[in-house]
Amino acid sequence: MENAKNAILNGSTALGIEFGSTRIKAVLIGANNEPIASGAHDWENRLENGIWTYTLEDVWTGVQDAYTKMAEDVKAQYDITLTNVGAIGFSAMMHGYMPFNKEGELMVPFRTWRNTITAEASEKLTGLFNYHIPQRWSIAHLYQAILNKEEHVKDIDFITTLDGYVHWKLSGKKVLGVGGASGMFPIDIDTKDYDKKMMAQFDELVAPYGYPWKLADILPKSLLAGENAGTLTEEGARLLDVSGNLKPGIPMCPPEGDAGTGMTATNSVTKRTGNVSAGTSVFAMIVLEKNLSKAYEEIDMVTTPTGNLVAMVHCNNCTSDLNAWVNIFKEYSEAMGMEVDMNKLFGTLYNKALEGDKDCGGLLSYCYFSGEHITGFEEGRPLFVRSSDCRFNLANFMRTHLYTALGALKVGLDILFKEEGVGLDKIFGHGGLFKTKGVGQSIMAAAMNVPVSVMETAGEGGAWGIALLASYMKNKEEGETLDSYLTNKVFAGQEAVEMNPDPEDVKGFDAFIERYKAGLAIERAAVDSKIW
């Protein structure tokens, strides 16, 4: 408590604020990089005129509320009115489209990563660059607006992402961390900046339209972790802290996307490391030693906050169907007159899965609540199927649902490991799948065939990650890399439980995934039948 108070009074803190899809969270960390206060604001995106968006009012009322609650937490715990912090950083959901004119006005509603309205642009740019451009990337949104002949495009002065926008309004600087920038436009891993060849290709592609700008004119400047990204202006301080207590002049680190802050929060920014987040959706990020041999539609290419190349496999579906089945067992237990402890129920059923056959006894399921681009589905139908001679018991049933939660992810990861020969020494897991000790971890190790570690601090999330990046910018020593800063000054002494893959589990998961891929025709028939 005394150390935290001194850090607040001395200004040796760092503040991280992240805009997640459903929550804006502010985390204040002390001199030892551990959280000492926090605040949060819940928000939801809205579908307006066919576009998933948040209004600018949503953005500012949300971040002000999160900051206010964090400052109130400081007051309640330490009896200190917060007037200064050592450094500030902002993070948000990557990608999307926010175009501004010369007057600084947003010309169309913010188009978030969730929109799938850029298929034509995505396909054409992927072909032009020979580099996979997902629909959610900013450049895909820009080119789709051009293809649609949208009136605002000729007046664009600046395009950015949500965290880049907030940083700009608070500091006056039109910049973005390289990890976030890699979700706007491809990065050259040698220069650790936008790929100049691809930028020239894009400018040539759109030249016939006669716009007064070049791509380099309208993208935010890309910065590496540790670089100074400006300071909080007087106007910015008033905009962030409605009480007026916060002083201007606070140094700000480059705003970073949620992928980069997730890597930072799990100490997985070094080559041959990675992290996997498994909850409602699941994604894995692997830091590569070299570029892939070709573009893959299933693999997104981004970077760490230091500009190292990262392969991302992102899947829409993970634990929703698994949770639905657990709730069926809850209903059964209640119908039998038993009082249900959900933690005990999850733990019992998850551990029961470990008793099952390594290949799930021939059972098969698909957890597709929604479409899954990895396997080519625009819609989903949750399914459980079996033949009459399968080994149908509770252990195999639960193991099947744990396996299939990672089924689409494994399809994507197998491209990296088996087709591209990507090397991986260890991966850090976080999210709901790992809450039952040892179970999700062993299933993930079997799917990936690498050691999987779980750290308690992984639950602190991206707001903590961007706070760490702010702390690194302010406190790093001469020549100290982000990798060494995290390892020696943040995660040193923190316990991580590592689990190695069981060779028999790996064989079993490989057998299951072959059945999974062969059975996709069943899922396709369910979608095409249109009976639901």
Image: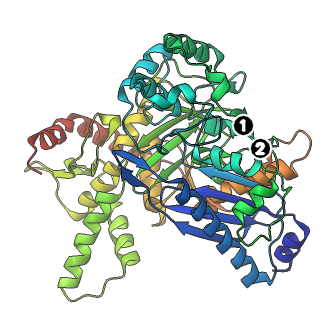
Question: Is residue 329 or residue 200 the one in the foreground?
Answer: 200
Q: Is residue 64 left or right of residue 253?
A: left
Question: Is residue 442 or residue 422 the one in the foreground?
Answer: 422
| Residue at screen point 86% across, 48% down | 476
Q: Is residue 102 left or right of residue 403?
A: right
| Residue at screen point 61% across, 56% down | 18
Q: Is residue 381 left or right of residue 111?
A: left
Asked if marks 2 and 1 touch (Cβ < 8 Å), the reply is: yes
Local packing at callout 2 (Cα closer than 10 Å; few below 14, some 14-19, many 20+) is: many
Local packing at callout 1 (Cα closer than 10 Å; few below 14, some 14-19, many 20+) is: many
Looking at numbered disc 1 in the image, what kind of residue is underneath it? Thr
Q: Is residue 347 visible in the rendered structure shown here?
A: yes
Query: On the rendered image, what quadrant is the N terminus found in?
Result: bottom right
The quadrant in which residue 465 appears is bottom right
Position above or below: 42 against 283: below
The quadrant in which residue 160 appears is top right
User: Percent position (x, y) of residue 408?
Assistant: 35, 41
Q: What label does residue 306 carry, if any?
A: 1
Tell me the residue that label 2 is attached to: 482
| Residue at screen point 38% across, 77% down | 344
Q: Secondary structure at mark 1?
A: loop
| Residue at screen point 64% across, 38% down | 179
Looking at numbered disc 2 in the image, what kind of residue is underneath it? Leu
Earlier residue among tags 2 and 1: 1
